[in-house]
Image (cartoon, rainbow, N blue to C red):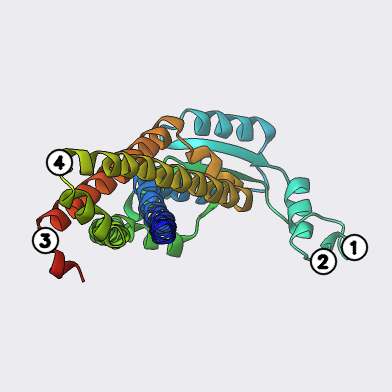
Amino acid sequence: MATTGKMTSRKGRTSYIMAIVGVSLVLVLLGFLGWMGINYSKLVDYFRESVPVQVFLRETTTEAAKDSLLAQVKVMPYVKSYSYKDKETARREWQSMGNEDFMAFIDTNILPRSIEMNLKSQYVVPDTLKKIEQTLLANTNVTDVKYPTNVVGSMTILRKIGFVLLAVALILAIVVIVLIDNTIRLAMFSNRFLIKTMQMVGATRWFIAKPMNIRAIINGSISAGIAIAVIWAMLLSIQQVVPELKTLHDTKLFILLCVLLLILGVAISLFSTHRSVIKYLKMKLDDLY
């Protein structure tokens, strides 16, 4: 009897560990999807505001005219940030890209001066950029305005992609919840004889369910904690590769996501465990085999 009890206890611990691991994995998936969801609009804004708009100046533009143009750019409502690039800076950038220094063959720096701007996200759309380009070209000191038209054009489908991702996330959320439920029910399957034995010796339904419900709450909390730690480590790793993503970090939203994962992990674990206990209590002994 003692050996049997130890084997049952060992099986129970193993099943609980497997349940914790399984729930943690699906919560990681759901949590990462949640992080992408709450940061999607920020990601879109970040990519749009990273599109460079280069305004090239005429060779004959005086310093006073250049300063006047910079003053105009500074107060333009659609400009998020800007920088002035003189001929020497343009030359250094040319060389940094692996190009040969043309000054070794000619005495004149042929690269033009320019102003590089980053626009606010709502203005980075083809029609609006075209109007901004025409406005800038109206200045007699501007020879050309360049920006990656293909990139800007492709960004118009970002909203559609967002709706598709939302639909996929909802479907995956349902699948994840079902997976968690099945994982816990499988873990409870190994305890079915223990549940039935306690019932047969006169234990009440509440007496049987209470310790398992408490265990479910603890396991759900542990699973959520593991998932939150993994998601946090993943985000730190991603930010190491792409440092610019640090600007998207919102502590309040991340804390809210962690709380939701904790609630979800505990709620589903408790619901699935309690339902399994009630199910095995209602079953006949012969049906457990």
The answer to whether the residues at label 2 and label 1 have Cβ atoms under 8 Å apart is yes
Horizontal arrangement in the rendering, residue 218 relative to residue 92 (left or right) = left
C-alpha distance separating marks 4 and 1: 93 Å
Horizontal arrangement in the rendering, residue 66 relative to residue 51 (left or right) = right
The answer to whether the residues at label 2 and label 4 have Cβ atoms under 8 Å apart is no
**Vertically, is 20 above or below 151?**
above
Write down the quadrant of residue 100 in the picture: bottom right
- The spot of residue 138 in percent (x, y) is 45, 44
Sequence-wise first label, 2 or 4: 2
Q: Is residue 179 visible?
A: yes
* Residue denoted by label 4: 204
Mark 4 residue type: Thr
* Residue denoted by label 1: 104
Tell me the SS state at disc 3.
loop
How many residues crowd mark 3 within 10 Å: few (<14), some (14–19), many (20+)? Answer: few
Tell me the SS state at disc 1.
helix
C-alpha distance separating marks 3 and 4: 15 Å
The answer to whether the residues at label 3 and label 4 have Cβ atoms under 8 Å apart is no
Sequence-wise first label, 4 or 1: 1
* Residue denoted by label 2: 100
Identify the disc placed on residue 20. Answer: none
The quarter of the rendered structure image containing the C terminus is bottom left
Tell me the SS state at disc 4.
loop
C-alpha distance separating marks 2 and 1: 9 Å
C-alpha distance separating marks 3 and 1: 90 Å
Mark 3 residue type: Met
Report the residue at 35% width, 44% height from top: 220
* Residue denoted by label 3: 283
In this rendering, which labeled residue sits more in front, label 2 or label 4? 4
Name the one closer to the observer, 139 or 116.
116
